DNA sequence: ATTAAAATTTAGGTGAACCTAAAAATAAAT
DNA sequence: ATTTATTTTTAGGTTCACCTAAATTTTAAT
């Protein structure tokens, strides 16, 4: 039986290695899990013993096929519970992540099947992130970060790069949610900021820092 | 922050002391939690230190007001999740308890408020057990165990004494569920068994062992 | 009242998951 | 190529939640 702590390590390694990197260093893992590098070494050695992780001294850890499946299932559960919290209990998107961090550890395949079905087999979570299938496949969305759009182009918000509460609150205040139309009016060269019209309504200027964190589908 | 293990001990002590007994012995707790008496002593001493439990050497443990509130909240959460699993996900009543044992440990007051509301503020769980209010009040149902009914009397099933899977399966096979009408046709003196008509339909003979575990409301 | 049985506690130990401080290895900078 | 900085591991703790075996206390039986 795998523990919550072990599950969290697998998820952290998944997150670090999902894009480019082919192994996760102890410092990177420690940062995500708010723990020390020494504790991470300790744990990845145990996970390696259990063959959930591939580990070479001083060269970081990566997920074994078994470890990868466990991590993917956790993400599936996490995102399905986020949909439940959002769609059924009407939690705002800033509050769902922390609760889902707890719920993702509940062990019952039947529960997840029924939940998935009950929610209408959603393919994306309330932050726009894809929900892996039972088999572990991720849909990839054809998306651009807003800062890549040219003047005059319009995008529909389909995702956000991260889930910091303050960032999501900021979007709420601007009445920006998934599905919101964002039209690039002007790209200001000198500071890389972007003037944007929100849903054919108000205007706002996004610093590069923000426009890079908004994923849109071109319209 | 209270751990899952600590929560389970508080719940066990609650269960043992809820009716008559005014303190829970180490053996009784050990039996519920499938652990050793020595481990129980260890834990109740820690819980006593935290003032969640009142403890006197060799005289067992009982819940402090704080401990009682935590235990009651756990039961509230457990039973609300059971309603969710039953009503929304259509799990049969034999399967909900084990999953709820995990879900009851999720920490979020807002979650439970919203869940309660979403479920329509149910007062009883799928086994007929009362769901304590937010303030910790239990409704008490005016109920009789079936073996107390006289010949000719009819009762409606409103609860079961325990939740053993085999027992609930047995009731399922007889098409007995909460709300089912049970009419006492004959009480057999020599072995204390009872002949019962189910929903004005089939007949069955219950040994005392069974009829004592069915709670009905007189009709 | 003794003695036997049962319940409870103490003693001593284990593994999981953390920690800090120090040592060792790797990577970066001069 | 050395030196310096960074990353990672090791060494040596701690706390929590369990364990078995032995000692103690309480309860029941003779
Ligand atoms: Mn999330
Ligand atoms: Mn999400
Ligand atoms: Mn239950
Ligand atoms: Mn129940």
Image (cartoon, coloured by chain):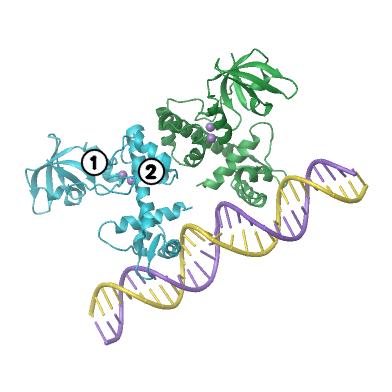
Chain colours: A cyan, B green, C yellow, D purple
- Near mark 1 (Cα within 10 A), the count class, few <14, some 14-19 or many ≥20, is few
Q: Find residue A151 and name its label.
A: none
Q: Relative to A112, does residue B155 appear above or below in the rendering?
A: above
Quadrant in which the C terminus of chain A is drawn: top left
Does any atom of ligand 2 lie closer than 8 Å to the CB of label 1?
no
User: Does the rendering let one see residue B137?
Assistant: no
- Near mark 2 (Cα within 10 A), the count class, few <14, some 14-19 or many ≥20, is many
**Residue A199, horizontal then vertical, whole percent:** 15, 35
**Residue A76, horizontal then vertical, whole percent:** 34, 45
Does any atom of ligand 1 lie closer than 8 Å to the CB of label 2?
yes
User: Does the rendering let one see residue B15?
Assistant: yes
Is label 1 or label 2 in front? 2
The residue that appears at 33% across and 35% down in the rendered structure is: A119
Q: Relative to B69, does residue A150 appear above or below in the rendering?
A: below
**Residue B124, horizontal then vertical, whole percent:** 51, 26
Q: Quadrant of residue A169?
A: top left
Q: Which residue is mark 1?
A: A171
Q: Which residue is mark 2?
A: A100
* Secondary-structure class at tag 1: helix
Q: Relative to B61, does residue B207 appear above or below in the rendering?
A: above
User: Sequence-wise, which precedes: disc 1 or disc 2?
Assistant: 2
Q: Quadrant of residue B206?
A: top right
């Amino acid at each position: 039986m795998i523990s919550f702590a072990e599950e969290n390590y697998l998820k952290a390694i998944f997150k670090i290695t999902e894009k480019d990197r082919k192994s996760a260093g102890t410092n990177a893992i420690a940062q995500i899990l708010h723990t020390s590098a020494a504790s991470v070494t300790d744990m990845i050695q145990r996970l390696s013993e259990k063959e959930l992780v591939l580990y070479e001294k001083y060269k970081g850890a990566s997920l074994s096929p078994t470890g990868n499946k466990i991590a993917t299932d956790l993400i599936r559960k996490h995102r399905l519970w986020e949909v439940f919290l959002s769609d059924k209990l009407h939690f705002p998107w800033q509050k769902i992540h922390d609760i889902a961090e707890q719920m993702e550890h509940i062990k019952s395949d039947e529960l997840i099947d029924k939940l998935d079905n009950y929610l209408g087999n959603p393919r994306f979570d309330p932050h726009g992130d894809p929900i892996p299938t039972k088999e572990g496949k991720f849909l990839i969305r054809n998306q651009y970060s807003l800062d890549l759009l040219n003047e005059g182009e319009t995008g529909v918000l389909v995702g956000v790069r991260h889930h910091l509460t303050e960032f999501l609150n900021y979007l709420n205040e601007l009445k920006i949610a998934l599905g919101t139309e964002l039209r690039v009016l002007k790209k200001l060269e000198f500071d890389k900021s972007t003037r944007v019209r929100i849903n054919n309504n108000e205007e706002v200027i996004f610093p590069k820092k923000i426009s890079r964190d908004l994923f849109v589908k071109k319209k």
